[in-house]
Image (cartoon, rainbow, N blue to C red):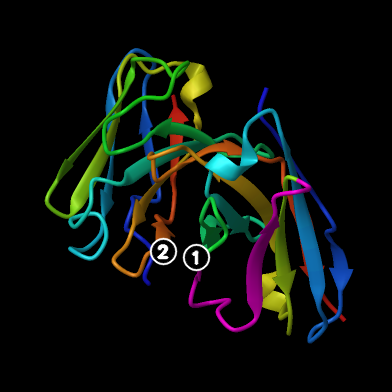
Amino acid sequence: QSALAQPASVSESPGQSITISCTGTSSDVGGYNHVSWYQQHPGKAPKLMIWGVSNRPSGVSGRFSGSKSGNTASLTISGLQAEDEADYYCSSFTTSSTWVFGGGTKLTVL
Amino acid sequence: QVQLVESGGGVVQPGRSLRISCAASGFTFTRHAMHWVRQAPGKGLEWVAVITYDGRNKWHADSVKGRFTISRDDSKNTLYLQMNSLRPEDTAVYYCGRDGSGWWAVDYWGQGTLVTVSS
């Protein structure tokens, strides 16, 4: 199972919006609405930000939203804040009943 | 509150075995599937294995299939990962995670345990 494709890095200024893409295949992202997104700060465990393509767990800011079109899922962060600077990973359930992660995207808030 | 505490990591020689554990508390363990996810130093997340809430089904990543086995002991609220024939490329922080009921995602993570495979 190949990793999902994410941009290695993105950057934007505080207050702006940014979208991170996650491209898979019809065997994972395109085949199921089981795409999730995780935020990871250096030295910390990952934190779930989005599940089921577009659902936010309790306590996650409404500035985070998710969507999907075909084999590509997206995470959008609006009103960027310094604390959003972190690594972001997408993940999807697959036809093999396994999960696969993306390679990760480093977000820099300029 | 939900707590997941991994233990058992350390330095092990290539070809040897190691079992790591994850003690769960603060929720009904038997209602949730559980995952292992690893992260090599300076690298991204890699999914390793999952076991269903009742322990009847388990799946492993191709990279560890035939060498690693996930299991659970519901009487102890503990998740395990038995790792055999370890390779240097298995060096990573190993996280256990709870699958949110019906979420198909890891909603709670432990802090991880470091496994280093080196001679």
x, y (%) of residue B86? Answer: 73, 80
Q: Can you identify the residue that label 2 sits on? A: A98
Q: How many marks?
A: 2
Left or right side of B104 for B54 = right
The residue that label 1 is drawn on is B57
Say which of B74 and B86 sits in front: B74
- Considering depth in this image, is B118 or A54 the residue closer to the camera? A54
Give amino acid for label 1. Answer: Asn
Q: Chain of mark 1?
A: B
Compare residues B1 and A64 and report the one nearer the observer.
Answer: B1
Within 10 Å of disc 2 (Cα), the crowding (few <14, some 14-19, many 20+) is some
Q: Is residue A86 magenta?
A: no
Q: What type is the residue that disc 2 sits on?
A: Thr
Q: Residues in magenta?
A: B57-76
Q: Nearer the viewer, mark 1 or mark 2?
A: 1
Tell me the quarter of the picture where residue B30 sits. Answer: top right
Please identify the quadrant where the C terminus of chain A is shown. Answer: top left
Displayed quadrant of residue A58: top left
Q: Residue at x 23, y 52 (%)?
A: A32
